[in-house]
């Protein structure tokens, strides 16, 4: 939830509301006193549901699906899915590794780890992240790149997610690519990042000789808006195409071209809606948002406040739920389109 204070800084009314709520909950320093790093949310789909959503989209398009699922700094989803009899061997063991570097951080998609070594490999990556030693981090990156048929992708490389400033972030990116560019097999065209940012990624890939592969950052109920198309019969073969032949063909689907702002709004609604069919039984949105207590135990927000969330939170959720109504979505689409036309005519 580290993004909340950054968004609030740009929206004074939101900052004031969060500040007031924090003080009423006993935080004397208000919004600045909240340890946002201990607050995190999880997507509205359980791993199997996410796999089935992506597979279904590909099947409906006439393709035999190859799906690689990644969590942020957590390898358990693909490991557990591979333990299911009907999915065993069908899902690559993959992870999205948060890679700290030169004052910022990058997300590295490490796909198709060898099943026999995946857990040990991830333990080493996680340990190197905790230590924060740059030379060790770079060494670990090279090690996973050398493992058999892995596919190492630098995800949404131009996103200054930490907020250090675009110039500084891009300087760190260029330094990373100059130092260990050979450890990356491809850069990611991200299905949920803005078009200009993806264009920067494509330009960088062309300049430096990287293929570009599809990725989603899909945390809601919408399937990925861009996919790779390949004749490979397995993920091993697909990884070899990208790694050794430097070949990648992508297909951008119709929802990729919808206005990004409208997709983000709808995405927030998907995250904060109730879901009676959730795979883990987390039906309410506050079942899926967690706070790490000082005892190190993760507890859902619902455990903290039961069925009585703070009034300001309840009001915000009600506002977001309005987006779920078709007339409201149509009005938003019309308003955003009008704003786009007016800004384009200036």
Image (cartoon, helix red, strand yellow):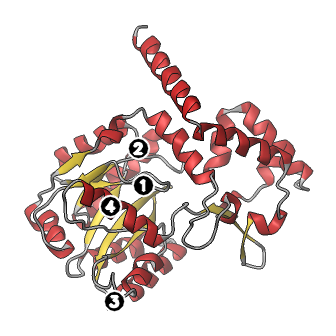
Mark nearest the camera among 4 and 2 is 4
Inspect this view and state whether residue 28 appears. Answer: yes
Q: Residue 160 versus residue 83: which sits nearer the camera?
A: 83
**In this rendering, position of residue 334 left or right of residue 269:** left
**In this rendering, position of residue 233 left or right of residue 94:** left
Mark nearest the camera among 4 and 1 is 4
The answer to whether marks 1 and 2 mark residues whose Cβ atoms lie closer than 8 Å is yes
Label 1 sits on residue: 217
Say which quarter of the image contains residue 295: bottom right
Q: How far apart are marks 4 and 1 (CA)?
A: 18 Å
**In this rendering, position of residue 196 left or right of residue 263:** left
Say which quarter of the image contains residue 307: bottom right
The answer to whether marks 4 and 1 mark residues whose Cβ atoms lie closer than 8 Å is no
Q: Distance between the residues labelled 2 and 3?
A: 32 Å
Mark 3 vs 1, N-terminal side: 3
Mark 1 vs 2, N-terminal side: 2
- Say what secondary structure mark 2 lies in: loop
Mark 4 vs 1, N-terminal side: 4
- Say what secondary structure mark 1 lies in: loop
Label 4 sits on residue: 56
Label 3 sits on residue: 117
Pointer 2 local density, CA inside 10 Å: few below 14, some 14–19, many at least 20: some
């Amino acid at each position: 939830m580290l993004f909340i204070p950054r968004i609030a800084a740009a929206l004074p009314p939101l900052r004031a509301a969060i500040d007031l709520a924090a003080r009423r909950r006993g935080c004397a320093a208000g919004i600045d006193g909240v340890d946002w790093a201990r607050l995190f949310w999880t997507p509205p789909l359980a791993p199997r549901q996410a796999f089935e959503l992506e597979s279904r989209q590909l099947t409906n398009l006439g393709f035999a699906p190859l799906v690689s699922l990644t969590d942020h700094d957590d390898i358990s989803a693909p490991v557990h899915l591979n333990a299911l009899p009907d999915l065993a061997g069908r899902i690559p063991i993959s992870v999205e590794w948060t890679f700290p570097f030169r004052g910022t951080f990058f997300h590295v998609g490490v796909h198709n780890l060898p099943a026999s070594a995946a857990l040990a490999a991830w333990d080493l990556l996680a340990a190197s992240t905790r230590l924060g030693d740059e030379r060790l981090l770079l060494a670990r990156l090279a090690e996973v790149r050398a493992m058999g048929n892995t596919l190492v992708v630098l995800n949404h490389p131009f996103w200054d997610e930490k907020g250090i400033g675009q110039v500084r972030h891009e300087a760190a990116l260029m330094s990373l690519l100059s130092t260990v560019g050979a450890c990356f097999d491809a850069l990611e065209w991200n299905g949920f990042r803005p078009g200009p940012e993806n264009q920067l990624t494509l330009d960088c890939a062309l300049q430096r000789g990287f293929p570009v592969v599809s990725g989603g950052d899909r945390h809601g109920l919408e399937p990925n808006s861009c996919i790779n198309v390949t004749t490979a019969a397995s993920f091993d073969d697909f990884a070899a195409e990208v790694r050794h032949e430097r070949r990648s063909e992508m297909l951008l689907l119709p929802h990729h071209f919808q206005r990004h702002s409208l997709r983000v709004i709808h995405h927030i609604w998907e995250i904060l809606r109730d879901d009676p069919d959730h795979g883990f039984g987390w039906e309410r949105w506050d079942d899926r948002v967690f706070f790490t207590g000082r005892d190190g135990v993760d507890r859902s927000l619902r455990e903290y406040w039961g069925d009585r969330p703070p009034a300001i939170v309840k009001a915000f959720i009600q506002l977001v739920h309005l987006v779920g109504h078709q007339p409201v979505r149509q009005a938003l689409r019309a308003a955003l389109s009008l704003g786009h036309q007016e800004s384009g005519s200036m």
